[in-house]
Image (cartoon, helix red, strand yellow):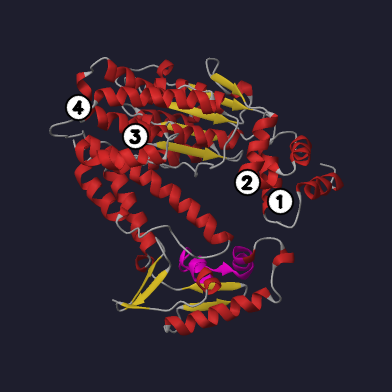
Amino acid sequence: MGLEFRVLGPLRARCDGHEIDLGRPQQRAVLAALLLAPGQLVPTERLVEGLWGEDDARWPKAPAGQIGTHAHRLRRALAAPGLLVATAGGYRLEVDRAAVDLFRYEAGVGEAVTLRYDDPLRARELLAGALALWEGRALDGVPGGFAERARERLAAGHHAAVKVLHDLDLALGRHAEALPALDALAAAHPRDEEVQRLHLLALHRCGRTAEALAAFEALRERLDRELGLEPAPAVADLHARIRGGDAELAAPSAPAPPRRPARPCQLPPDIPDLVGRAAQVREAERILRAAGGGEVDGGGAGASPVLGLSGPAGSGTSALAVHLAHTVQDAFPDGQLYAAGETAEPVTVLAAFLRALGERPVEDAGVGELGARYRAALAGRRVLVVLDGVTDPAPLLPAVAGCAAVVAGAEPGALPADAARLAVGPLEPQDAYELLARVVGAERIRREPGPAAEVAELCGYLPVLLRSVAARLAARPQWSVADLVRWLAERGA
């Protein structure tokens, strides 16, 4: 059996079925950081900052020496020569990824997503098996900022996987089995509109249509009262179909989804603390879902909208583009393609897109030929293309019915004449305040509203700058917000 490690719950290690005492909390934190990057060098500086933060005033004496002591004790506890290697500048844990529950979980989720449309029954089995590896809160009890950030990331991924599991339950006609869990999930996540959508559908399919309609009205009132928003189009559309008695909402008796080609998902991770963009998100979602929800057997570029995002440096157009893509991901089930950077050459990007779509690009082909093959590969699919800062986006636009593109940071003249455009400017003062509170902590910001307002003003209310300075303040708990104002003023911010 050998060594096995668990991070999806309390950090644990076993050797041939016997539990290993991993020692003190900080020692366990060092092991956690190494386990999340098996076989890779983790710099000592990163381990130090992961344990004690970026503010060196809060570090103990000789922090690198303390890391070395923790590593030495871990070697003795694990009793496996050559497992924990000290190298110049850091440490490396030579452990097979399959020995860590996290990577078995991620492999199961990845395979399930791949089979989601071709074989939903097998996909559900794989996903349920992967989720069964969780034993509570990831890295529970492990101290330090590194562990906390990992916990947040893993919790977000777990929540997304649970939603996919229940979506598969509904596709397979298991609404009665899924409803109790969806009841609890909807209560725990009242603002998660995908959870609410799944809950409404399960209620309706279980013959509790009146409750589903009442739950939608409660959701609408809550969103209006707390956020000043209407429910997302996907939820509103489901509500309308339930009220209209749409027979297609009935549970499938024998699901047999058509086989679909490769479905790439190249999106970077979504940003967790996006604020102040609700109006742009709603408008963009309306535009993009019109393509993703439309028919895909016709032609014409008119059914392939292009949404351009523009704004001053620091306004967060890149983060917004990625957030939008994640928001409408369900409307483009055949994949999401992504390219970024001014140096992204169309020939190189087109070849990469073709490979992601399961095609083999012709060697030495030009932009014209690759573009034609690219659009042929997209025909009949619903794919979203996200281009960030690409100098020449035109050859990369899908121009195929059922597809759409989000383009951030392009010159206005580089977009088609009929492209929709959204301006992304500085945040409103109250939204800038909320962003600071989310990153630094609400209580800390609430104690100094005046200096917090000065920070926002010095940053021009630009979210990229605000997030950067807020992270600096969060890493220095001995600073007041007024200290941050002075620091910014000294640097001419």
Looking at the image, residue 276 sits to the left or right of residue 153; the answer is right
Query: What amino acid is found at the position of numbered circle 3 in the picture?
Result: Asp
Mark number for residue 47?
Answer: none
Q: Residue under circle 1?
A: 473
Q: Residue under circle 2?
A: 439
Regarding mark 2 in the picture, which secondary structure is present there? helix
Mark number for residue 334?
Answer: 3
| 209 within the magenta span | no
Tell me what residue is drawn at x 49 percent, y 52 percent. Answer: 152
Query: What amino acid is found at the position of numbered circle 4 in the picture?
Result: Gly
Q: Residue under circle 4?
A: 207
Tell me what residue is drawn at x 21 percent, y 29 percent. Answer: 205
Q: Nearer the viewer, mark 3 or mark 1?
A: 1
Tell me what residue is drawn at x 59 percent, y 34 percent. Answer: 275
Regarding mark 4 in the picture, which secondary structure is present there? loop
**Can residue 208 be seen in this snapshot?**
yes
Q: Are marks 4 and 3 in contact (CB under 8 Å)?
A: no
Residue lying furthest left? 254
